[in-house]
Image (cartoon, rainbow, N blue to C red):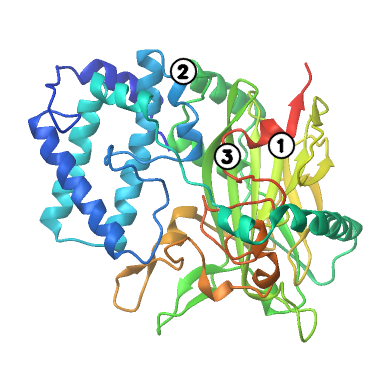
Amino acid sequence: MLRSRFFFLLFAALLVGCTTPHQTTLFTQNGATCENRLSAYYKKVEHERDFKLPYHQDLRFPHLAFDRFSTSFVGELSSASAQAQWLAYVGHKGKEQLDVALALTPVDTRHQIELKQCQQQLLEETIENSRFWGELENSPPSVPTAYEHWKRVVGVYPVATLVAEGQIEDEQERIKADFGRTLKHPFRYGEPPTHLTPQKVKAMFEEASRYSSLQWPLLTSDESEALLDRFSPLFVVETLSPNDIPGALTLDGQDRILINTQTPVIYRSVTYTRFHGKVLPQLNYALWFPARTAKGHIDPYAGEFDAVNVRITLGEDGAPLILDSIHQCGCYHMVYALSPTLWFTERDDEKPIQNYLFPTTDNGRFEISLTGGEHMISAIHVTDNIQPDITLQAREIKETLMLSDSTGMRQSPFDEFGILEQSLRGERWFLWPFGVRSPGAMRQHGQHAIAFIGERHFDDAFILETLLYQSQ
């Protein structure tokens, strides 16, 4: 998250001075020492890790970290202000990356301070470093795919898609047939109501966009938190068993991963998407459950842990424009167009579940109904900004990557591929030909392949643009 909309202007104003070319580095002599120190640390992390870092690491630029959104801009940084805004973003991701790495692969305090100081020094040298910008343009970083293509080759993917296409459509029709039914034993979970008016939201967006040459609103951390508070949904959960009680992802006294239902939590973050020439903020909310309940003695889709991710994309005026959702496995992508100006595109590959919903959220917020057992969205309404039955505590999504164990050390619940191994599902044995790693298993954010037919990532910079077009 950008700390301030003026951060990139401070780069341009304060970070002056020439850099001296070096035969083996992009930086000056002091910078080269820092570059080597950071690179050596990340090589150590790569050698020792049993977890996956939250962002893509390119060792040519060890002080930065990349996601699919940031890499989509590399060929468009033609002005100094655009470069500075982009650098502030990937620099902040680099700091988050280092924080996670140090928590999971700790070093002594002195070394930790040196690494953080080096990262800041390299950021200061980067803004006017022509060698860096040249290297970036000539060989841009690329976030690896979440698909395993060799499985599609071995599994005769073209034939497998012919079999799966009808089954996927049937499953989507089954889910849609449950829309609107009355839930049994519902409980309403949510954050306390807030009263940020539409006028204040619109003014916030106008101010945040004033200084951007990339059509990218520069929201401060406080503004981001205010938006997350304002649009945090209410969840009406059908409660048929303890598996339907949301909680916190945690480690118990024996360092086993579980969902602590004594602490109802909603995990949140702000991301961005590119939508027909504009950059739009996205409010992400994740609700975790202990399990998906089995429907019988053999249910390949059931197992430990389940989670639902809801993402609200705000338009240029700060009003909700699109709502979409997946489960933590990347399954069941649903997309709701929230404006009559939006239309779904025709596609030959796998389509998400598509819906039109034209609510007025000026003084209300979304109420999302989840079925018991499967935790499928069965209805979305707009309700008054009311107090929930059970209050959810807000935590950052990145906290799911660093859980405290019984010794006070940090561990990631996800493995080196970003998979929560305790959540493995039986469906992986017959869905592997589609190239998705361990279908049905829970995975960390940024690792969501969300289509079996075709290739689509939940965090792709242009995903909504490929699914929807907007009329004037």
Q: Residue 212 carries which label?
A: 2
Closest to the observer, 43 or 398: 43
Query: At label 2, which amino acid type do we have?
Result: Ser
Q: Decide: marks 1, 2 in contact (CB < 8 A)?
A: no
Q: Residue 394 carries which label?
A: none
- Name the side, left or right, on which 213 lies relative to 37: right
Q: Residue 460 carries which label?
A: 3
Q: Decide: marks 1, 3 in contact (CB < 8 A)?
A: no
Residue picked out by circle 1: 322
Dot 1 surroundings within 10 Å: few (below 14), some, or many (20 or more)?
many
Q: Distance between the residues labelled 1 and 3?
A: 15 Å
Q: In this view, does 428 lie above or below 378?
A: below
Secondary structure found at label 1: strand
Query: At label 1, which amino acid type do we have?
Result: Ile
Nearer to us of marks 1 and 3 is: 3
User: Quadrant of the image for the N terminus?
Assistant: top left
Q: Which residue is drawn at 76% across and 83% down?
A: 298
Which label's residue is closer to the chain start, 3 or 2? 2
The image position of residue 455, as x and y in percent, is 64, 45
Closest to the observer, 150 or 191: 150
